[in-house]
């Protein structure tokens, strides 16, 4: 495969907030610690090395040992699990929901970015070890966001009435989907049919895809890991420090013209139990689980933190902190929306004396198959043109490839100038005539515009075949009008080429913040 790059700005797909971060705009520099450049990992290493407690490392290693029990462990993963016990081993992490069959392509891109970052870090700092980590969002309860995926232009949906943390769902009913999927999906059959929880199934297929790259899969929904977060639980429930710090950051960002992505609550934890993950609230010293009859006194909730911290599940505000408390982590790899909301959290990390990780954007990409690439080569358009709106793209192609004179811009300008002269003459005779001339001028210019559009439509009919080819290319890169990486499943490509992920690992550069286009 060959790799081409496009500026992120030229894709028209990213917010000014995110692009300002990547351009290191001075006004945003106070909201992050170190920018994702290779040389900045040196001081990040030293800081995390000093700040990460040996006890936390021991708890992490023990938890992972239990989580991997019963799973095939490759030599690379085994080496990384062992390495994590060393004070000279650090992680680079990405997190994602437990999407059905991996969900959209960018799930794969996030993990590839983490793997490649660790490789680059090992080259730059050979005296340390670097472990790529995928953090499963197993405690998420938004089933609607994970229940569907799109393969070969068809949408598949898992229907289940289970509730609570999705990682605890029983995946056996996915059998109905498995029987309808095209191609070889044996890896997923093994995952979904031999594990009792969705988290177990996801660990299985992610391990099958990335074990040879040493990727470690971590489930934060684990009692011993939650014990490391007790201090934060108590602070959040009784002192509400996170809310204060996030609101302060939000005020500063709003004063700079940015719109915050997330908002803190007084309490940023859910109560987590079997089939249940509901918000905790407090009124007059009594703690309640929203939409249930469950209530706790202040003494009872303190006792629960001490004895059963696994009952507390952090929300979007505190999940990042939880990750950094239990991992010797240097950088977090996320998408545009994730990076932006992490920029709201630096004050929370400072309050809890936890190093703020380097925020790395994941790799962004689109992939053309061979038939589509052949069509593209015949169009004569540039890759960046494909990111334009369809009608603009078609008009642009016609303007470049037609011998006809299709623009009446000159004539419209001349007509406008002529009517301005007429208006001046008419107003000199009778000022009330000026409005009449303006109305006629508008009508004339609108008529010329309508003629121009009809000329363009007529010319498009002469080039219908070429425009259909162009539309087919556009539809592959933007199925249903959405970016391919956010819509299509990786099986679209993996079933045709078992080396697909290896191609991504080979071509993607985690420190090149441009859009990647892969072609045959």
Image (spheres, rainbow, N blue to C red):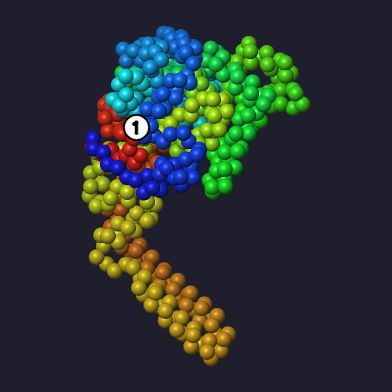
Q: Return the residue at label 1.
A: 38
Q: Which residue is at a point 57% across and 45% down the rendered structure image?
A: 254
How many numbered marks have been drawn onto this rendered protein structure? 1
Image coords of residue 200 (percent x, y): 46, 16
**Viewer-proximal residue among 191 and 50:** 50
Residue at the outermost right position: 284
Q: Quadrant of the C terminus?
A: top left
Image coords of residue 46 (percent x, y): 41, 24
Q: In which quarter of the image is the N terminus?
A: top left
Q: Quadrant of residue 70?
A: top left
Q: Which residue is at a point 77% across and 26% down the rendered structure image?
A: 284
Q: Which residue is at a point 40% across and 22% down the rendered structure image?
A: 91
Q: Quadrant of residue 409?
A: bottom left
- The answer to whether 352 appears left or right of 457 in the picture is right
SS class of the residue under badge 1? helix
- Relative vertical location of residue 113 with respect to residue 165 in this rendering, above or below: below
**Viewer-proximal residue among 56 and 462:** 56
Can residue 262 be spotted in the picture? yes
Image coords of residue 489 (percent x, y): 38, 32
């Amino acid at each position: 495969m060959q790799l081409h790059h496009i500026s992120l700005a030229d894709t028209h797909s990213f917010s000014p907030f995110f692009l300002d971060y990547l351009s290191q705009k001075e006004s945003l520099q106070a909201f992050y610690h170190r920018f994702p450049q290779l040389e900045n990992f040196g001081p990040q290493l030293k800081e995390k090395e000093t700040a990460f407690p040996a006890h936390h490392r021991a708890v992490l290693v023990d938890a992972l040992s239990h989580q991997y029990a019963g799973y095939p462990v490759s030599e690379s993963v085994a080496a990384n699990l062992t390495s994590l016990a060393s004070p000279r081993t650090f992680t680079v992490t990405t997190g994602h929901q437990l999407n059905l069959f991996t969900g959209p392509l960018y799930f794969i891109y996030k993990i590839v970015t983490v793997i490649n970052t660790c490789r680059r870090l090992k080259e730059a700092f050979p005296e340390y070890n670097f472990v790529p980590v995928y953090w499963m969002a197993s405690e998420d309860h938004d089933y609607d966001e994970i229940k569907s995926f799109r393969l070969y232009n068809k949408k598949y949906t898992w229907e289940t009435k289970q509730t609570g943390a999705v990682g605890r769902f029983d995946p056996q009913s996915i059998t109905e989907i498995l029987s309808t999927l095209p191609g070889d999906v044996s890896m997923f059959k093994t995952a979904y049919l031999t594990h009792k929880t969705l988290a177990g199934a996801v660990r299985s297929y992610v391990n099958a895809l990335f074990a040879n790259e040493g990727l470690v899969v971590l489930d934060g929904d684990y009692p011993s890991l939650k014990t490391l977060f007790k201090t934060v639980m108590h602070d959040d429930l009784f002192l509400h420090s996170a809310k204060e710090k996030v609101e302060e950051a939000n005020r500063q960002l709003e004063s700079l013209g940015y719109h915050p992505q997330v908002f803190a609550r007084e309490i940023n934890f859910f109560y987590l139990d079997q089939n249940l993950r509901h918000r905790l609230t407090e009124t007059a010293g009594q703690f309640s689980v929203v939409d249930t009859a469950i209530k706790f006194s202040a003494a009872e909730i303190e006792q629960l933190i001490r004895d059963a911290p696994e009952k507390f599940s952090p929300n979007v505000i505190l999940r990042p902190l939880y990750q950094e408390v239990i991992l010797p982590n240097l950088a977090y790899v996320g998408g545009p929306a994730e990076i932006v909301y992490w920029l709201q959290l630096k004050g929370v990390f400072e309050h809890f004396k936890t190093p703020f990780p380097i925020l790395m954007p994941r790799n962004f990409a689109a992939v053309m198959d061979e038939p589509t690439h052949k069509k593209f080569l015949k169009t004569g358009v540039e890759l960046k043109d494909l990111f334009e709106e369809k009608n603009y793209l078609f008009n642009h192609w016609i303007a470049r490839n037609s011998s006809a004179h299709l623009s009446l811009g000159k004539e419209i300008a001349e007509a406008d100038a002529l009517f301005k002269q007429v208006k001046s003459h008419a107003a000199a005779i009778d000022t009330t005539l000026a409005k009449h001339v303006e109305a006629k001028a508008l009508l004339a210019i609108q008529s010329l515009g309508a003629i121009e559009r009809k000329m363009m439509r007529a010319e498009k009919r002469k080039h219908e075949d070429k425009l259909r080819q162009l539309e087919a290319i556009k539809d592959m890169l933007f199925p249903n009008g959405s970016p391919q990486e956010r819509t299509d499943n990786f099986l679209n490509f993996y079933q045709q080429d078992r080396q697909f992920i290896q191609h991504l690992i080979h071509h993607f550069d985690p420190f090149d913040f441009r859009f990647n286009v892969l072609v045959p």
